[in-house]
């Protein structure tokens, strides 16, 4: 479904369900992660882009303190009072919205005074590693800000969504997904520096495009693997803080050369985990220099290196993603390919020559089908404008 159709369907369903027009509608896109994996919570760097698919949230005020929230695709509704907002154990889709509402009011949603009626609908494939959950948080927060007349800068809004993930959805994520959804720009990448929460747009030019290839391997970040990787990075940072002479608070402060010199003091697994974000930071910095020179092939080869690092060191890839990247590597019109996002399933992001998109999709589909019997989903992605009110 195209975005306009999603919007039309949402507004029609909203009016039917609640008997009024929405007072505010906001849109927030999903994202692809292009280079820099698991660097965000290590205060490092990432290249990402907002995609041309997203989620809409429509909202109207209640007369009292009651809230009603409907998932527009399967038309399931939950009701609660502003004095009683807590993480749900069932119908957990609501947690992204209720958690965002909760933290928009600093954990005291009763301060909102009045409740709301909301409905959301989107077209981001779920479980694909395209951050449908962050998109839901960001369209929720924008629509609720409009409804309650609240003004906050984008980084604060992103942090509200991140807090919802941590406390309501149970995923200790970084800020990448929310920031990419907010700071996206048509035709461009978002270059993020998570230590200083600095976000800039970098133009990519018309000669290349992105393709997402969604494996059929389950992608779930709330089952512990993501958290254990984050924990290993934090343990490693503590160790380096003890052995290096300069200040270290996060792995951002450690270089590859320092890792080589001092890795012996870490357990083998923790050492393997640590080099991934450390190497990714260097790749993003090198990648930025290559993009400035217009060296897209050089940038693409860093994407391949990034995937190797996921595969060998961070171990957040899986057979299906490796099959996609290996197949992509053999196609001359693919400049780079890597897993995108948390990993452990989900999607790969490819940097491609757009005129060869069909050929690339066919070749990767054939390789995947030979290995697993089913087909991945391939789609050309247009880097797009970030979240906004409609
Ligand atoms: C997920 C998380 C992000 C980020 C990526 C990996 O998408 O939500 O915060 O850590 O994984 O780079």
Image (spheres, helix red, strand yellow):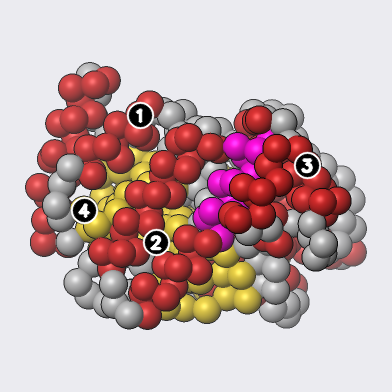
Q: Name the element at disc 3.
A: helix
* Residue 276, magenta (yes or no): yes
Does residue 335 lie above or below 151 as drawn?
A: above
* Nearer to us: label 1 or label 4: 4
Q: Name the spot of residue 77 as percent of width and height, x first.
A: 62, 40
User: If you read the primary sequence from the N terminus, does the residue marked by circle 2 or circle 4 appear first?
Assistant: 2
Q: Is residue 75 left or right of residue 217?
A: right
Q: Which residues are magenta?
A: 270-281
Q: Earlier in the sequence, mark 3 or mark 2?
A: 2
Q: Where residue 248 sits in the image (x, y, percent)? A: 79, 60
Within-10-Å neighbours for mark 2: few <14, some 14–19, many 20+: many
In three-dimensional space, the C-alpha distance between marks 1 and 2, rounded to whole angstroms, equals: 23 Å
Foreground pick, 19 / 242: 242
**SS state under label 4:** strand
Residue sitting nearer the eye, 282 or 262: 262
Left or right, 135 with reference to 10? right
**Label drawn at residue 51:** 2
Disc 4: which residue:
334
């Amino acid at each position: 479904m195209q975005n306009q159709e999603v919007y039309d369907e949402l507004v029609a369903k909203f009016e039917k369900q609640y008997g009024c027009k929405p007072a505010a509608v906001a849109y927030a896109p999903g994202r692809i992660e292009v280079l820099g994996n698991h660097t965000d919570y290590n205060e490092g760097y990432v290249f990402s882009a907002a995609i041309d698919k997203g989620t809409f949230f429509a909202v109207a005020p209640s007369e009292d303190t009651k809230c009603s929230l409907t998932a527009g695709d399967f038309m399931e509704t939950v009701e609660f009072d502003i004095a009683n907002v807590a993480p749900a154990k069932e119908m957990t889709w609501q947690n992204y919205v209720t958690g965002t509402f909760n933290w928009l009011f600093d954990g005291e949603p009763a301060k909102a005074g009045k409740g709301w009626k909301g409905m959301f609908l989107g077209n981001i494939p779920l479980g694909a590693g395209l951050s449908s959950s962050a998109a839901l948080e960001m369209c929720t927060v924008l629509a609720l800000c409009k409804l309650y007349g609240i003004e906050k800068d984008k980084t604060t809004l992103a942090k509200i969504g991140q807090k919802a993930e941590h406390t309501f959805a149970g995923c200790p994520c970084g800020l990448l997904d929310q920031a990419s959804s907010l700071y996206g720009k048509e035709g461009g990448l978002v270059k993020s520096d998570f230590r200083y929460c600095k976000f800039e747009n970098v133009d990519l030019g018309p000669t290349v495009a992105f393709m997402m290839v969604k494996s059929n391997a389950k992608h779930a970040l709330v089952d512990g693997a993501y958290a254990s990787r984050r924990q290993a990075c934090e343990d490693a940072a503590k160790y380096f803080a003890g052995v290096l002479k300069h200040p270290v608070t996060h792995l951002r402060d450690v270089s590859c050369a320092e890792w080589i010199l001092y890795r012996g003091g870490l357990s083998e697994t923790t050492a393997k985990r640590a080099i991934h974000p450390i190497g990714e930071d260097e790749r993003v910095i090198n990648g930025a220099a290559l993009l400035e020179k217009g060296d897209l092939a050089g940038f693409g080869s860093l994407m391949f290196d990034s995937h190797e690092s996921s595969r060998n060191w961070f171990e957040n890839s899986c057979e299906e993603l490796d099959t996609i990247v290996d197949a992509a590597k053999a196609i001359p019109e693919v400049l780079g390919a890597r897993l995108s996002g948390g990993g452990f399933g989900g999607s790969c992001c490819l940097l491609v020559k757009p005129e060869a998109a069909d050929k690339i999709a066919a070749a990767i589909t054939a390789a995947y089908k030979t290995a697993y019997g089913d087909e991945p989903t391939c789609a050309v992605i247009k880097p797009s404008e970030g979240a906004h009110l409609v």
